[in-house]
Amino acid sequence: MSKEKIKKAYDELAESYNRLIDHKPHNAYYDRPNTLNLFEDVENKSILDAACGSGKYTEILLSRNAQVTGFDLSSEMIKFAKERNANQGIFFVHDLSEPLTMIKDKSFDFVLCALALHYLEDWNLTIREFHRVLKTNGQLIISVEHPFFEYNYYKSTEYFKTEPVKCIWKSFGKPIEINSYRRPLNDCIEPLTENGFYIDKLVEPKPLKEFEKLDQKHYKELNKFPAFMCIRAVKK
């Protein structure tokens, strides 16, 4: 899969994504609250927001007096992240699949990676880099598409295979093709446990009540079957 396809899609999405992300149901009332609940006290803590998009997570964490550094593949997303956060935090363009050579060992108390790892075919290098830049006992907090949901959604026939998939997003304005990878549960867990982490908590989230006001159909569906999965992993 071409990284350029992913970058191009997010560059095109950036303006509408940034405009809608504060209250878009799957993000604002499903992914974010459940992922943020995995954080312990972040005041005066250093956080790497990996694949930060337009900087909404960073905005929330900065409001809690954390020190946040964010990066994203999309230069357009980084532009909006800087604008949203009014020159607070540090932002740069970087590919999640490449080593973080600009960051020293043991630099961060937390690494956050929300709804981005599915753009990588192989997580191992990225997870090793997260481990390297975390302080001793630092925490990696991620959210990912639930592997059981994806298996059904993409009508896959080989559960144990990591495979390229694509879908059309229509909720950010004009329809746009999004390319990613679907994988089994084992391939979400093993890159963590084999690269220096133990899993402290795994959440199959439910939507907040606010979700129902905006999207009753998906609110009912998400209370029956999860679309995402949130994990807190601790550096050994």
Image (cartoon, grey):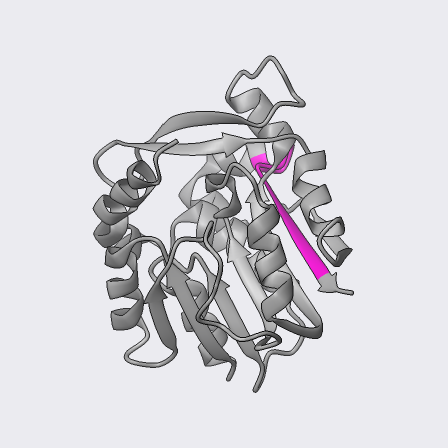
Q: Is residue 120 visible?
A: yes
- Residue 112 is left or right of residue 167, and the answer is right
Residue 94 picture location, percent across and down: 37, 59
- Residue 23 is left or right of residue 68, and the answer is left
Residue 167 picture location, percent across and down: 38, 27
Residue 37 picture location, percent across and down: 63, 63
Residue at 38 percent across and 49 percent down: it is 24
Residue 127 picture location, percent across and down: 61, 54
User: Which of these two is toward me, 229 or 78?
Assistant: 78
| 229 in magenta | yes
- Residue 200 is left or right of residue 52, and the answer is right
Quadrant containing the C terminus in the rendered view: bottom right
| 58 in magenta | no
The quadrant where residue 110 appears: bottom right
Residue at 23 percent across and 57 percent down: it is 76
Query: Which residue range is magenta in the image?
Result: 222-233
Q: Is residue 208 visible?
A: no
Above or below 169: residue 209: below
Residue at 71 percent across and 53 percent down: it is 195
Q: Number of numbered discs present?
A: 0
Residue at 39 percent across and 31 percent down: it is 1
Above or below 198: residue 68: below
Above or below 191: residue 48: below
Residue that extends furthest to the top in the rendered view of this protein: 157
